[in-house]
Image (tube, grey):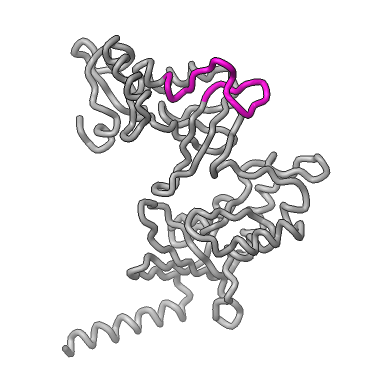
Amino acid sequence: MQRSRNWVVAAIAAVGWAIVAGLPLTFFGSGGVVVEGPAGVPAPGVLLVQNHWIPLLAVQPPREFNDCFVQRVQVQCTLTTQARLAELVANQTVRCEIPHYAKDNRGWGTCWVRGADGAYPADSLNLVMIRDGLAMVDPLHTRAFDAEGDRARRDKRGIWAGTVMPHSNQTGSLTGGAQVENAGLIEIRDVSVHLYGVDAPLEEQRCLLNGLDYACGLLARAHLMELIAGQNQVCRTERNKDDGNIYGLCGQAGPGGRDMADGATSLNEMMIEDGWAVAARGAPKDYVRLEAAARGNKRGMWAGQFVRPAEWRHGQR
């Protein structure tokens, strides 16, 4: 008992000395992690404290300069958002609470700047960013800031003084030129969209053809690049509540940009039909039939042997 009491006293003394010395602290609790110390701003809406990369909970900053217009003139609201956040935390001590969210391993945080009296104010940086119109509201894990977000928009504060293009990371439509991140993931207007119902190999996955090892993941990525080359893509997107990712049904955009071109086949279907991806668990039955046809015709990866991408990602070789 005495040894336990001595340990507690020593621990309290160490924490007290760190606070007096101004050193950063990290606390671990049942609800998550609390970090405290100087903060950097590596990206809009993101703090770096104690080597923790902390996206601010519920804060959705504009991610590219042409998200904002004032009297039809593009303004760099992304840089404005990042600069304002950097100003708020400059030479200050910041405390962030980072709870755990089921099936989401990102460290979303609510953060405060310590005042001159050593206390933390009631208003978090999250609230200040939304209230001042420096960011939109992301309702993924909380709706606590909806009212302030609506008020900032109504009062035309910050980015709302002009025209803001809603960030397409919720349910909706997303159109533009696409970049390929991997054989099942494309990026449009700075939004990463997973091809819904598609289980595709990562670039590093290897397969066998005629008994020889080859880079099937790299070839699958190249095939998707070939499918989208020179075309605008349109994706009907939806955020998955379980993992926070954006999933989409994507294909060549029609003249209006809102829907796929007449007669166009989705990228989702083509990747499976051409044998460079398989139907994901829970995919539509049409995708399962396309996979069976690709297997029967020995297209793509089906020309040889391979481990299904989901199993390969979990270590099966």
* Residue in view at x 43 percent, y 63 percent: 98
Percent of width and height locating residue 83: 66, 55
* Residue in view at x 24 percent, y 82 percent: 7
The answer to whether residue 155 shows anywhere in this view is yes
Residue 54, magenta (yes or no): no
- Relative to residue 311, is residue 31 depicted above or below? below
Q: Which residues are magenta?
A: 251-270
**Which part of the image, by quadrant, shows the C terminus?**
top left
Q: Residue 73 falls in which quadrant of the image?
A: top right
Front-most of residues 252 and 311: 252
Residue 254, magenta (yes or no): yes
* Residue in view at x 58 percent, y 63 percent: 145
Percent of width and height locating residue 144: 55, 64
Tally of numbered tags:
0
Percent of width and height locating residue 306: 24, 22
**Which part of the image, by quadrant, shows the N terminus?**
bottom left
Front-most of residues 289 and 139: 289
Q: Residue 301 falls in which quadrant of the image?
A: top left
Is residue 316 found left or right of 221 in the rendered image? left
Front-most of residues 121 and 290: 290
Percent of width and height locating residue 147: 63, 63
